[in-house]
Image: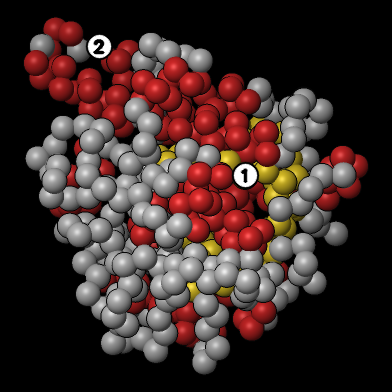
Amino acid sequence: MPKRVFITGIGIICAIGNNVNETLHSLLAEQSGIGEITLFKTVHKGVIPMAEVKLSTESLLEESGHGGNRSFTRTALLGMKAAREAMVSAGIHDVQQYKTGLVSATTVGGMERSEDFYASFLADPGKGRLINIVNHDCGDSTERIAVSLGISDFVTTISTACSSSVNALMLGANLIKTGQLDRVVVGGADSVTKFTLNGFNTLMILDKTGCHPFDENRAGLTLGEGAAFLVLESEDVVLKEQKKILAEVSGYGNANDAFHQTASSPDGAGAYLAMSKALKMSGLQPGEIDYINVHGTGTQNNDLSEGVAIERIFGDHVPPFSSTKGFTGHTLGAAGAVEAVISVLAIQNQVIFPNLGFTTPMKELQIQPINKLTNNVEIKNVLSNSFGFGGNNSTVILAGMGSDK
């Protein structure tokens, strides 16, 4: 019989907080992290907003104990900080006590280091050395996070666009269920870069007023950055160590609608399949889902496609839902983990966080998101969606320990 998988620790750094407590405080205060670009020079400053972490790379280096060492990328530093908080949250003092793995997700990797190299190379090609961009690949941040945590039993990287860190969570859960590992630190990290800013701007899907998910007048997403990690542990370890359980990984599913490189299918086929698979694994009926943390990027295509799929799954009984990207921006490869942590906070605090920026219902849908903080609600089961370019759609269901599942 497959082993149950529990979440025993969480860590996060994003535009609304440098840790879990700060992030929760901002969520409860309905305070968005979207603002003006400050981390690099760009012609888009003052025109296109972003959701930046409120710590400089230098500050992150100092805090990590590697001050002045520019071989650490911003992505790696964000990941190290969030992963360490997750480990402390889980009360792990000896990482070697049980077979432990790390599955980390990213899309940007060390791109900002490559951008610095390119600028210096253009100024003086004689100074261009490949050693300056060895941190470019996605695996570099994973390796550095693993070293900082002392994890060596299993280390791997996942990069499936914006569904990356939910897929990291799924792989981690599978490794525990099949008995290959006792616990896995799962999540993702991504920093903002000129590459992603200019790339998404070229696609014409950035909202110059900040994202408005599921709003009729939505005009695009807002890029964000950050990292989030969760500690998954087997039922055996949890019982033996008498661990405090934050939530159970109840179900998950992945599907690809193979429709378009950057667009979701109009009928939400991939989203529907991912949610259906997650529900089937969890053993839950649609009516047992108490809250949906939607992918909700704020683009014309995504919100309509996801909304259609949700209506198809839940019919006339769609549970309360909201996108929290109005707080954090779209953190790309970290988004699924960021929103999984937020989902855990929703369960732990019995609260639904609002869909910031929503004012006008979409004319194509019968549903609309929660736009005000809702306290004292019974939340046992949360479904969280993460959908990526290339049609890679992933869904995870987290259950509070008051749930029957």
Q: Position of residue 360 (x, y in %)?
A: 28, 80
Few, some or many residues within 10 Å of mark 2 (<14, 14–19, 20+): few
Three-letter amino acid code of the residue under disc 1: Ile
**Label 2: which secondary element:** loop
- 126 to the left or right of 94: left
Vertical order, 33 against 74 (above or below)? below
Q: Which residue is mark 2?
A: 129
Which quarter of the figure has residue 237? top right
Q: Residue 333: horizontal and vertical position, in percent? A: 43, 47
* Left or right of 348 in this view: 182: right
* Disc 1 element: strand
Q: Which label was assigned to residue 284? A: none
Image quadrant where residue 283 sits: bottom right
User: Rounded to the nearest whole Å, what is the CA distance between mark 2 and mark 1?
Assistant: 39 Å
Q: How is the image coloured?
A: secondary structure
Give how far across and how far down residue 18 sits, in percent.
Answer: 47, 38
Residue drawn at point x = 26 percent, y = 43 percent = 196
Image position of 330 (left or right of 289): left
Using the image as rendered, state which of residue 269 and residue 240 is in the foreground.
240
**Residue that carries the numbered disc 1 in the rendered image:** 10
Picture residue at 12% right of the left edge, 12% below the top: 125
Q: Looking at this view, is 47 or 205 the one in front?
A: 47
